[in-house]
Amino acid sequence: MTTSAMTGTPPLSAPVQDPLPPLRPPSGKRPWRQALRRDWQLYSLAVLPILFFLVFRYLPMIGNVIAFRRFEPGGSILGEDWVGLRYVEMFLNDPAFWQVFRNTLWIGFLTLLFCFPVPIVLALLLNEVRRTSLKRFVQSVSYLPHFLSIVIVAGITMQMLASDGPVNHALAAFGQDPIRFIQEPEWFRTIYVGSEVWQTAGWGTILYLAALSTIDDDLYEAARIDGANRWQQTWHVTLPGIRPTMMTLLILNVGTFLAVGFEKIMLLYNPLTYPTADVISTYLYRTGIESNSFSYAAAIGLFEAVIGLVLITSANQMSRKTVGTSLW
């Protein structure tokens, strides 16, 4: 009789192995292929957006080659003769280009300065409204201008600021002389930025209101226990809670810093306001379409794209180092 039988203890056995070993992707097959096969319905939804960007965003980039070639209407679509940096030197030495470049910087800076913080302030104010009916009414009124066509917005702006418009009638009631807002160059930037704030402020609050709804209420409770008032709660709890959303939208706005509203400026400006209203996009339109200088316009457009790429890359790196939030 063995020792284990005499003591009544079961005999030692080899450790039991797991009958189901962990699944591994079969050799020759990659995990992304398995995901594509399993969720092909979801991936199929991305086909149309990908085709859109390929056809209307990436393929037209081939046309940038005419910035370095002489293009003539009716000739080769990629230009006739190689001219190198001739058109680049032309616009770098053109005083008119630097005038519109300064106008673009001014309008882009003012638009970013006013249009970026206004939706944040409006979202914070709406977040403090406790009466649901009043909050919905304010939201509906502020969202409405976004759904109006730019042509309608420009028409309303011009009618309001016309020589016999409501604004000048109000000034006349206070004994002021009528002001030709649409014809005066010094008023154009104020008019453009003001109409842009009115049109986009309400719509921009949607993302911030969504970000505000994700902030934990326990943080506000802890702040109140520590004796924080409403302003201190906003500064130390609310703003840090929506900071990632703020930085993401700021990076996107910086990337389009030079791409100010072409359509609205085309509808609002006139030859009298060119000194302050003419920007790169409108200058490109007049140079490329009206004057048939396509190669010269392509060189300016390529320069604008390079500046935009540098701006968005710099803003992304700065955001990553300072607040830890970036697009990539």
Image: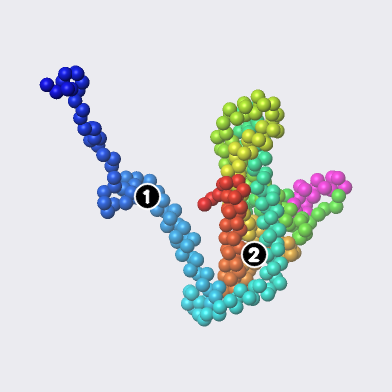
- Residue 280's disc is 2
Image: 173 above or below 264 = above
SS for dot 2: helix
Q: How many labels, in total?
A: 2
Image: 209 above or below 171 = above
Residue extending farthest left? 1
At a point 70% along the width and 62% down the height, the residue shown is 103
Q: Could you tell me the amino acid type at mark 1?
A: Ser
Q: Which residues are magenta?
A: 161-175
Marked residue nearer the N-terminal end (2 or 1): 1
Residue 305: x and y in percent read 58, 63
Q: Gap between marks 2 and 1, in whole Å?
A: 38 Å
Residue 270: x and y in percent read 71, 63
At a point 56% along the width and 38% down the height, the residue shown is 210
Instruction: Mark 2 and mark 1 in contact? Answer it, CB < 8 Å.
Output: no
SS for dot 1: helix
Can residue 286 be seen here? The reply is yes
- Residue 52's disc is none
Is 185 placed left or right of 308 in the picture? right
At a point 71% along the width and 67% down the height, the residue shown is 99
Classify residue 192 by image quadrant. bottom right
Is residue 168 found inside the magenta-colored segment of the image?
yes
Can residue 203 be seen here? The reply is no
Q: Could you tell me the amino acid type at mark 2?
A: Ile
| Of residues 73 and 51, the one drawn nearer to the viewer in this rendering | 51
Residue 151: x and y in percent read 62, 54
At a point 70% along the width and 63% down the height, the residue shown is 102
Image: 125 above or below 76 = above
Which residue does the numbered mark 1 point to in the structure image? 44
Classify residue 230 by image quadrant. top right
Dot 1, how many residues are within 10 Å of its Cα: few (below 14), some (14-19), or many (20+)?
Answer: few
